[in-house]
Amino acid sequence: MAGEPRPRPPLRRVLLVLGGGLLALLLVIQLIPYGRDHSNPPVTRAAQLDPETRQVVAEACADCHSNETRWPWYTNVAPMSWFAQSDVEGGRKILNFSRWDTPQPSADKLAEVITSGEMPPLKYEILPNHAKARLDEREQRALIAGLRRLYREDPPAGIKVIGTKPRQ
Ligand code: HEC
Protein backbone atom coordinates (compact mmCIF):
# COMPACT_ATOMS: atom_id res chain seq x y z
CA MET A 1 0.00 0.00 0.00
CA ALA A 2 2.49 2.56 1.16
CA GLY A 3 4.26 4.40 -1.64
CA GLU A 4 1.86 3.16 -4.31
CA PRO A 5 1.08 6.13 -6.56
CA ARG A 6 -2.58 6.98 -6.61
CA PRO A 7 -4.05 7.16 -10.14
CA ARG A 8 -4.56 10.73 -11.21
CA PRO A 9 -8.28 11.49 -11.21
CA PRO A 10 -9.37 11.65 -14.86
CA LEU A 11 -11.77 14.55 -14.18
CA ARG A 12 -9.59 17.07 -15.95
CA ARG A 13 -9.43 14.94 -19.04
CA VAL A 14 -13.18 14.25 -18.96
CA LEU A 15 -13.89 17.96 -18.72
CA LEU A 16 -11.53 18.72 -21.58
CA VAL A 17 -13.16 16.15 -23.83
CA LEU A 18 -16.66 17.34 -22.88
CA GLY A 19 -15.71 20.97 -23.40
CA GLY A 20 -14.14 20.20 -26.75
CA GLY A 21 -17.20 18.25 -27.82
CA LEU A 22 -19.51 21.07 -26.78
CA LEU A 23 -17.42 23.61 -28.64
CA ALA A 24 -17.42 21.44 -31.76
CA LEU A 25 -21.19 21.04 -31.49
CA LEU A 26 -21.66 24.81 -31.15
CA LEU A 27 -19.55 25.36 -34.25
CA VAL A 28 -21.40 22.72 -36.27
CA ILE A 29 -24.88 24.05 -35.44
CA GLN A 30 -23.87 27.43 -36.85
CA LEU A 31 -24.06 25.78 -40.28
CA ILE A 32 -27.81 25.17 -39.98
CA PRO A 33 -29.47 27.87 -42.10
CA TYR A 34 -32.66 28.26 -39.98
CA GLY A 35 -32.71 31.51 -38.01
CA ARG A 36 -30.63 33.62 -40.38
CA ASP A 37 -33.47 35.26 -42.25
CA HIS A 38 -33.89 38.36 -40.02
CA SER A 39 -36.16 39.96 -42.56
CA ASN A 40 -38.33 42.90 -41.58
CA PRO A 41 -41.20 42.91 -44.09
CA PRO A 42 -42.71 46.28 -45.06
CA VAL A 43 -44.99 48.06 -42.60
CA THR A 44 -48.36 47.99 -44.36
CA ARG A 45 -50.13 50.11 -41.75
CA ALA A 46 -48.58 51.13 -38.44
CA ALA A 47 -50.87 51.24 -35.40
CA GLN A 48 -51.14 54.89 -34.33
CA LEU A 49 -49.97 54.57 -30.74
CA ASP A 50 -49.50 57.63 -28.56
CA PRO A 51 -45.79 58.38 -27.96
CA GLU A 52 -45.56 56.93 -24.43
CA THR A 53 -47.37 53.71 -25.34
CA ARG A 54 -45.33 53.43 -28.52
CA GLN A 55 -42.17 53.56 -26.41
CA VAL A 56 -43.33 50.76 -24.11
CA VAL A 57 -44.53 48.63 -27.03
CA ALA A 58 -41.16 49.16 -28.73
CA GLU A 59 -39.32 47.93 -25.63
CA ALA A 60 -41.66 45.12 -24.62
CA CYS A 61 -43.65 43.81 -27.61
CA ALA A 62 -42.52 45.08 -31.01
CA ASP A 63 -39.48 42.83 -31.45
CA CYS A 64 -41.91 39.91 -31.86
CA HIS A 65 -45.18 41.65 -32.74
CA SER A 66 -44.17 44.09 -35.49
CA ASN A 67 -42.16 44.21 -38.70
CA GLU A 68 -39.64 46.49 -37.00
CA THR A 69 -37.76 43.79 -35.12
CA ARG A 70 -34.37 44.67 -33.66
CA TRP A 71 -31.94 41.83 -34.25
CA PRO A 72 -29.15 42.06 -31.64
CA TRP A 73 -25.83 40.30 -32.37
CA TYR A 74 -26.73 37.13 -30.47
CA THR A 75 -29.67 36.50 -32.81
CA ASN A 76 -26.97 35.60 -35.34
CA VAL A 77 -25.67 32.81 -33.13
CA ALA A 78 -27.34 29.39 -32.93
CA PRO A 79 -29.16 28.27 -30.86
CA MET A 80 -30.34 31.78 -29.82
CA SER A 81 -31.02 32.56 -33.49
CA TRP A 82 -33.48 29.66 -33.64
CA PHE A 83 -35.49 30.89 -30.65
CA ALA A 84 -35.54 34.44 -31.99
CA GLN A 85 -36.70 33.33 -35.42
CA SER A 86 -39.48 31.13 -34.08
CA ASP A 87 -40.66 33.80 -31.60
CA VAL A 88 -40.77 36.48 -34.27
CA GLU A 89 -42.59 34.26 -36.76
CA GLY A 90 -45.11 33.08 -34.16
CA GLY A 91 -45.52 36.54 -32.67
CA ARG A 92 -46.10 38.35 -35.97
CA LYS A 93 -48.70 35.79 -37.03
CA ILE A 94 -50.86 36.35 -34.00
CA LEU A 95 -50.47 40.12 -33.41
CA ASN A 96 -48.66 42.62 -35.62
CA PHE A 97 -48.61 46.36 -34.87
CA SER A 98 -47.16 46.94 -38.38
CA ARG A 99 -50.11 45.31 -40.12
CA TRP A 100 -53.00 47.21 -38.58
CA ASP A 101 -54.76 46.79 -41.94
CA THR A 102 -55.32 43.13 -41.02
CA PRO A 103 -57.41 41.60 -38.19
CA GLN A 104 -55.78 41.52 -34.75
CA PRO A 105 -56.70 40.00 -31.38
CA SER A 106 -59.01 42.05 -29.18
CA ALA A 107 -57.80 44.69 -26.71
CA ASP A 108 -59.18 42.45 -23.96
CA LYS A 109 -56.89 39.64 -25.09
CA LEU A 110 -53.87 41.96 -25.01
CA ALA A 111 -54.85 43.18 -21.55
CA GLU A 112 -55.24 39.60 -20.37
CA VAL A 113 -51.76 38.42 -21.41
CA ILE A 114 -50.12 41.57 -20.02
CA THR A 115 -51.87 41.33 -16.65
CA SER A 116 -51.13 37.61 -16.33
CA GLY A 117 -47.46 38.29 -17.07
CA GLU A 118 -47.61 35.85 -20.00
CA MET A 119 -46.34 38.66 -22.26
CA PRO A 120 -43.61 39.70 -22.69
CA PRO A 121 -42.28 36.13 -22.30
CA LEU A 122 -39.93 35.51 -19.37
CA LYS A 123 -37.12 34.28 -21.64
CA TYR A 124 -37.21 37.70 -23.32
CA GLU A 125 -37.41 39.99 -20.32
CA ILE A 126 -34.64 38.24 -18.37
CA LEU A 127 -32.08 39.24 -21.01
CA PRO A 128 -30.00 42.20 -19.75
CA ASN A 129 -30.69 44.29 -22.85
CA HIS A 130 -34.45 43.87 -22.31
CA ALA A 131 -34.60 45.28 -18.79
CA LYS A 132 -37.17 47.84 -19.94
CA ALA A 133 -39.50 45.03 -20.99
CA ARG A 134 -39.96 44.09 -17.33
CA LEU A 135 -43.17 45.89 -16.49
CA ASP A 136 -44.31 46.52 -12.96
CA GLU A 137 -48.00 46.73 -12.17
CA ARG A 138 -48.19 50.45 -12.78
CA GLU A 139 -46.46 50.13 -16.15
CA GLN A 140 -48.75 47.25 -17.09
CA ARG A 141 -51.82 49.37 -16.30
CA ALA A 142 -50.47 52.30 -18.32
CA LEU A 143 -49.69 50.04 -21.28
CA ILE A 144 -53.16 48.47 -21.19
CA ALA A 145 -54.79 51.93 -21.02
CA GLY A 146 -52.69 53.07 -24.01
CA LEU A 147 -53.60 49.96 -26.00
CA ARG A 148 -57.32 50.39 -25.23
CA ARG A 149 -57.05 53.98 -26.42
CA LEU A 150 -55.43 52.71 -29.62
CA TYR A 151 -58.26 50.25 -30.24
CA ARG A 152 -60.79 53.06 -29.70
CA GLU A 153 -59.11 55.74 -31.77
CA ASP A 154 -57.32 53.68 -34.41
CA PRO A 155 -58.89 50.22 -34.40
CA PRO A 156 -57.32 47.41 -36.46
CA ALA A 157 -59.05 46.23 -39.66
CA GLY A 158 -60.89 43.60 -37.66
CA ILE A 159 -60.83 41.55 -34.49
CA LYS A 160 -59.80 37.94 -34.79
CA VAL A 161 -60.69 35.33 -32.25
CA ILE A 162 -57.70 33.41 -31.00
CA GLY A 163 -57.84 30.31 -28.89
CA THR A 164 -55.33 28.68 -26.63
CA LYS A 165 -53.82 26.92 -29.65
CA PRO A 166 -53.30 29.88 -32.01
CA ARG A 167 -53.78 29.17 -35.72
CA GLN A 168 -53.35 31.32 -38.87
C1 HEC B 1 -39.99 37.31 -27.46
C2 HEC B 1 -41.08 37.56 -28.34
C3 HEC B 1 -42.36 38.17 -27.81
C4 HEC B 1 -42.52 39.34 -27.12
C5 HEC B 1 -41.45 40.32 -26.69
C6 HEC B 1 -43.94 39.48 -26.89
N1 HEC B 1 -44.60 38.42 -27.43
FE1 HEC B 1 -46.60 38.13 -27.48
N2 HEC B 1 -46.36 36.32 -28.36
C7 HEC B 1 -45.16 35.81 -28.81
C8 HEC B 1 -45.39 34.53 -29.45
C9 HEC B 1 -44.31 33.64 -30.09
C10 HEC B 1 -46.76 34.28 -29.37
C11 HEC B 1 -47.57 33.13 -29.94
C12 HEC B 1 -47.27 31.83 -29.34
C13 HEC B 1 -47.70 31.73 -27.92
O1 HEC B 1 -48.91 31.72 -27.65
O2 HEC B 1 -46.81 31.60 -27.05
C14 HEC B 1 -47.34 35.43 -28.66
C15 HEC B 1 -48.68 35.55 -28.36
C16 HEC B 1 -49.28 36.72 -27.96
C17 HEC B 1 -50.70 36.93 -27.84
C18 HEC B 1 -51.77 35.86 -28.07
C19 HEC B 1 -51.89 35.07 -26.80
C20 HEC B 1 -52.84 33.89 -26.90
O3 HEC B 1 -53.51 33.61 -25.90
O4 HEC B 1 -52.87 33.23 -27.94
C21 HEC B 1 -50.89 38.22 -27.44
C22 HEC B 1 -52.23 38.91 -27.22
C23 HEC B 1 -49.58 38.81 -27.28
N3 HEC B 1 -48.62 37.87 -27.59
C24 HEC B 1 -49.34 40.11 -26.86
C25 HEC B 1 -48.09 40.60 -26.53
C26 HEC B 1 -47.88 41.90 -25.94
C27 HEC B 1 -48.97 42.92 -25.64
C28 HEC B 1 -46.53 42.03 -25.75
C29 HEC B 1 -45.80 43.17 -25.09
C30 HEC B 1 -46.23 43.53 -23.76
C31 HEC B 1 -45.91 40.81 -26.22
N4 HEC B 1 -46.88 39.97 -26.68
C32 HEC B 1 -44.54 40.54 -26.23
C33 HEC B 1 -43.92 36.41 -28.70
C34 HEC B 1 -43.66 37.59 -28.01
Image: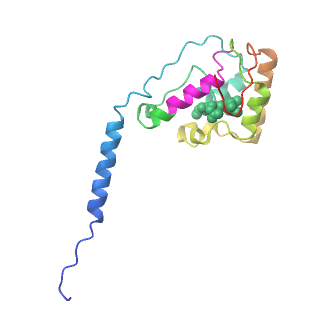
The answer to whether residue 139 shows anywhere in this view is no
Vertical order, 7 against 11 (above or below): below
Find the magenta span and give its range.
Answer: 84-100
**Is-magenta flag for residue 88?**
yes
Q: Quadrant of the C terminus?
A: top right
The residue sitting at 77% across, 16% down in the picture is 155
Vertical order, 77 against 97 (above or below): below
Residue 159: x and y in percent read 76, 19
> Mainly helix, strand or loop, the magenta region?
helix
Q: How is the image coloured?
A: rainbow
On the picture, is 30 further left or further right than 164?
Answer: left
**Is-magenta flag for residue 57?**
no
The answer to whether residue 16 shows anywhere in this view is yes
Q: Residue furthest right?
A: 152
Residue 117: x and y in percent read 70, 41
The residue sitting at 64% across, 21% down in the picture is 96
Residue 118: x and y in percent read 68, 39
Of residues 100 and 51, the one drawn nearer to the viewer in this rendering? 100
Ligand 1: image quarter: top right
